[in-house]
Image: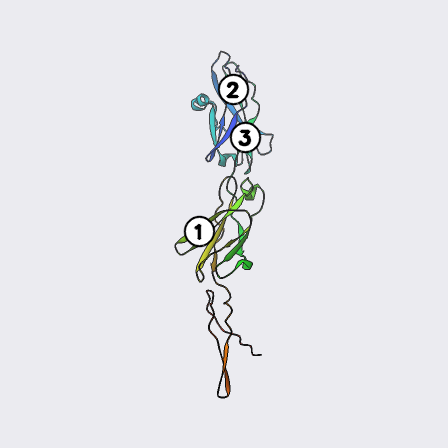
Amino acid sequence: MPSQPDAPTTTVDGNNVVIDWNAPNDNGSPIRGYIIYIRQSDNSTFSVSTTDCNGALLSIRTETKCSVPISTLRGTQYELTWGSIVYAKVLAYNDYDSSQVSTVGGSAKILTVPNAPIAVSELYSSRTATSLGLQWSIAGYGVTKDGGSPVINYQVTYTTGSTTIVVPNIADTKYTANNLVNGANYVFFVQAKNSFDLSLNSQLTYMYCSFVPATPVAPTTSVSLNKVIIKWDAPNNNGALIDSYSVQIK
């Protein structure tokens, strides 16, 4: 019978996990195939994926590796969650008998992007005539939300007209965009980033860059017949039409 194989390795290759091992000594009788076991989510049970890792196939037997879709590993047979490490073990057999099963090996961690940020809204304390603020929440914690890898930072994208600004590597869950065009419309969205990649876009947030009017300069007063005329210049409206004035007389 063949010698005991060394522990296999596991690596992520796109949407698949590759299980790779070295051919053991056949001890004088050619190896006819391998049985590849993959550990399930309970961390103790091992199953064989005969569809993707049929060690009797010439190609797998020759290359001593097989490839399993991550979708299969997350399916009902294995039920691995995002962030799980894929562990495997291998047995070789020839015409005489089967080898001992290898020790367990593997380091491939299956990841995906985190969920998009939620509760995106204006941060009103940041609003000025040329600034707009945004705040948001992470979409939850744990492998069902962060894609199996903690959120590292965030990316904010905002557009006005044909201009798009991308701001990466934001550590906080809020951001203030400065030097904006007063009186312009802006559209914002946020993405979360983990070690795998950026999330999908959050909901769009629409904001108009405007602020309270500037302080009027001191008015002038004059007498015309039996009336006092109070006159002032319109101040900068900071992007929004002035609806009315409040006049106070001492």
Q: Which mark is residue 165?
A: 1
Query: How far across and down, in percent of the image, does residue 172 sit?
Result: 56, 49
The answer to whether residue 51 of the structure is visible from this angle is no
The quadrant where residue 83 appears: top right
Q: Residue at x 50, y 78 (%)?
A: 220
Query: How far across and down, in percent of the image, does residue 25 sit?
Result: 51, 15
The residue closer to the viewer here, 212 or 218, is 218
In the rendered image, which residue does mark 3 sit on? Answer: 107
Q: Residue at x 49, y 35 (%)?
A: 70
Under circle 1, the secondary element is strand
Query: How far across and down, in percent of the image, does residue 174 sit?
Result: 54, 52
CA gap between label 3 and label 2 equals 22 Å
Q: Is residue 158 left or right of residue 99?
A: left
Residues under numbered marks 3 and 2 in contact, where contact means CB atoms less than 8 Å apart: no
The quadrant where residue 144 appears: top right
Q: Amino acid at mark 3?
A: Ser
Q: Amino acid at mark 1?
A: Ile
Q: Amino acid at mark 2?
A: Ala
Above or below for 123 versus 235? above
Q: Which mark is residue 92?
A: 2
